[in-house]
Image: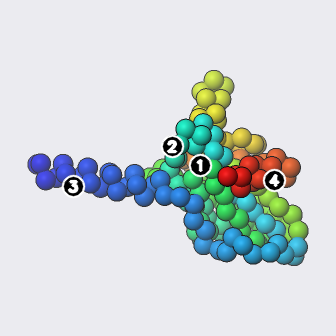
Amino acid sequence: MGQLYRIVIAFCVAFQLAACAGPSAIESQSKQRDTRLARMYFLREKAVIGALGGTTPAAEIKVDGKTVGSVTNGSYIFVDRSPGPYKLSVQTGISLAFETEVQVEAGRAYYFNIGVPTSGAPGRDLLNQIYAGGSGQRMRAQSPLTTGFSGAVFFSLDPSAGAAEIERLKAP
């Protein structure tokens, strides 16, 4: 029994360390912008938890079912895609993935903030947003089931707010 307990503890510690890994992107983050493509930014605000030196679990991001990278608090990645519809997905830890659809146009930038799901209770939602981030317009899930069981959701930011947040994240 004692050995099983140690194995379970070791697994939990390894899982927690993996979940708190920093940002990673599959695609180059230094390429020049191509006006024939749409640029999609995926970001996670620093929020209070980041300002205090803590981290949130890494959020894995997929576009059309393919992993494009992951972000944690105070970080971002971007991908360039041709105009058209895309299925976006974000997942943290062992929770269900939050999935939504978006239509993008050439030459435009889109900003998707990753935050905690809202519950409808204004006080709790405000505290969660302050603590872990999640500003913007919450995007509609493809399935209502995933909304309740997802550890992270997408919030759409307007272009000026999104660009300003990216600049804040770039600052040392």
Q: Residue 59's spot in the image, x, y percent?
A: 56, 55
- Residue 101 falls left or right of residue 91: right
Secondary-structure class at tag 2: loop
Q: Where is residue 102 in the image (x, y as percent from the top left)?
A: 76, 59
Q: State whether residue 109 appears in this view.
A: yes
Residue, x 76% and y 43% (percent of image)? Answer: 137
Q: Which of marks 3 and 2 is nearer the N terminus?
A: 3
Q: Which residue position holds label 2?
A: 54
Residue contact between numbered discs 2 and 1, judged by CB atoms under 8 Å: yes
The residue identified by callout 4 is: 163
| Residue 61 rendering spot, x and y as whole percentages | 60, 61
Label 1: which secondary element = loop
Q: Disc 3 and disc 4: Cα gap in Å?
A: 45 Å
Estimate the spatial distance between the alpha carbons at disc 1 and disc 4, rounded to whole Å: 17 Å
Q: Name the residue under label 1.
A: 73
Q: Which amino acid does label 1 sit on?
A: Asn
Snapshot quadrant of residue 15 = bottom left
Q: Alpha-carbon neighbours of circle 1 within 10 Å: few (<14), some, or many (≥20)? A: many
Q: Which of 148 and 54 is in front in this view?
A: 54
Comparing 130 with 158, the one in front is 130
Tell me how far mark 3 sits from mark 2, CA to CA.
26 Å
Question: Among all residues in the image, which is located at the extreme left?
Answer: 1
**Which residue corresponds to mark 3?**
7
Q: Say whether marks 3 and 2 touch (CB < 8 Å).
A: no
Q: Distance between the residues labelled 4 and 2?
A: 24 Å
Tell me how far mark 1 sits from mark 3, CA to CA: 29 Å
What residue type is disc 2 on?
A: Gly
User: Could you classify mark 4 by the number of other residues whose Cα lies within 10 Å: few (under 14), some (14-19), or many (20 or more)?
Assistant: some
> Camera-side residue: 172 or 101?
172
First in sequence, mark 2 or 1: give its number.
Answer: 2
